[in-house]
């Protein structure tokens, strides 16, 4: 089961979280039929979204849009405060190796756009350059530069022999309030010195043991263990709303063709509307 552990070290002025995201990453790869390099990219992005989603307050959501000059072109991943994550990759057929260099080449140079829905009048949007196109370092740059909070992020994916996801997971460490930041720098150094998080998970460690290893002798408290899942909010009702938004002329054309198929680009769930369904919809349109 995928889950995330949220912790806090009050005296040290830091919070940290670690997750295992194997199943949700594998589900994203399955739904988009990704090739190995695209599998790694999407898995890392979904894991990053899960980590940042755990920073949100109740009912808040965020979207991460990675746009690059490489063959992947674009990825959009979304997460809420409840551990629900979904994602989209523009070119799932990208292959050519599964190393970090390959991911950098596959993403290319570009930008990361972070959009937050915090239930205010307007959405909050930040745009930063992709500093390495490795996903985690780009998210770390965003947190440090745009949110001005000292942070360290690491995500990873290990593939199996057939290019499937064997394990995925990540860690996020963040300074609290106006702390000076000595502890966050110490923990960030420890994170760099440790074996990659995904390799630790693949060897049998858990988010709990990874956090214990990271904190060492620093006292900390576990706040929550929360399930993570690939979950899309699409529905037949929303798909019908999308058809309505096309207007009468386009719905009439679909009616004449005999059917309409709405394909959710996040999860590839397909909603079929028959000629009779479209006729009822036309009766309701002005």
Image: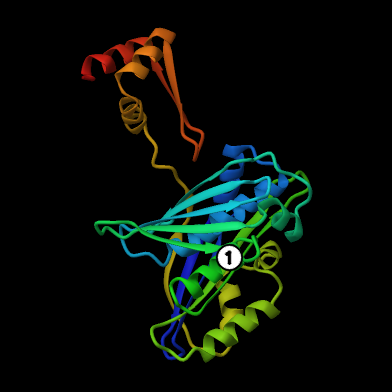
Residue 53 x/y as whole percent: 43, 61
Q: Residues within 10 Å of mark 1 (few under 14, many from 20)?
A: many
Residue at point 75% right, 53% down? Answer: 98
Q: How is the image coloured?
A: rainbow
| Residue closest to the eye, 73 or 49 | 73
Q: Is residue 248 above or below residue 268?
A: above
Residue in the foreground of this view, choosing between 224 and 233: 233
Which image quadrant: the C terminus?
top left
Going 74% across and 46% down the picture, which residue do you hit? 163
Residue topped by disc 1: 138
**Residue, x 55% and y 72% (percent of image)?**
208
Q: Is residue 54 above or below residue 24?
A: below
Q: Position of residue 206 (x, y in %)?
A: 60, 67
Seen at 55% across and 70% down, the residue is 140
Q: Nearer the viewer, residue 258 or 221?
A: 258
Nearer to the camera, 207 or 136: 136
Q: Measured from the top left, where is residue 41 in percent x and y? A: 64, 52
Which corner quadrant of the image does residue 167 belong to?
bottom right
Does residue 33 appear left or right of residue 144 in this picture?
right
> Would you identify the image quadrant in which residue 139 lies?
bottom right
Name above or below for residue 101 compared with residue 177: above
Provide residue 51's location: percent of width, then percent of height.
49, 64
Q: How many marks?
A: 1
Give the structural element (helix, strand or loop) at label 1.
Answer: helix
* Relative to 169, 14 lies left or right: left
């Amino acid at each position: 089961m995928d889950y995330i552990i949220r912790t806090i070290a009050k005296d040290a002025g830091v919070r940290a979280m670690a997750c295992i995201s194997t199943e949700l990453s594998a589900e994203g790869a399955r739904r988009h039929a990704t090739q190995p390099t695209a599998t790694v990219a999407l898995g890392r992005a979904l894991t990053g979204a899960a980590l940042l989603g755990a920073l949100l307050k109740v009912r808040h959501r965020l979207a991460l849009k990675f746009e690059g000059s490489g063959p992947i072109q674009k990825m959009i991943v979304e997460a809420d405060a409840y551990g629900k994550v979904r994602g989209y990759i523009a070119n799932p057929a990208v292959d050519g190796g599964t190393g970090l260099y390959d991911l950098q080449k596959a993403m290319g140079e570009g930008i990361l756009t972070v959009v937050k829905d915090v239930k205010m009048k307007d959405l909050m949007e930040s745009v930063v350059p992709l500093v390495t196109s490795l996903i985690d370092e780009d998210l770390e740059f965003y947190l440090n530069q745009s949110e001005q909070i000292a942070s360290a992020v690491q995500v990873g994916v290990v593939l199996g022999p057939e290019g499937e996801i064997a394990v995925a997971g990540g860690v996020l460490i963040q300074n609290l309030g106006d702390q000076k930041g000595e502890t966050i720098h110490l923990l960030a150094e420890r994170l760099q010195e440790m074996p990659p998080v995904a390799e630790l998970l693949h060897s049998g460690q858990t988010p709990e043991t990874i956090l214990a290893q990271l904190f060492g002798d620093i006292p900390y408290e576990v706040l929550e263990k929360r399930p993570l899942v690939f979950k899309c909010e699409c529905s037949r009702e929303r798909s019908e709303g999308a058809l309505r938004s096309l207007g009468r002329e386009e719905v009439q054309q679909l009616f004449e063709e005999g059917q309409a198929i709405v394909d959710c680009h996040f999860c590839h769930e397909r909603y079929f509307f028959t000629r009779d369904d479209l006729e009822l919809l036309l009766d309701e349109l002005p």
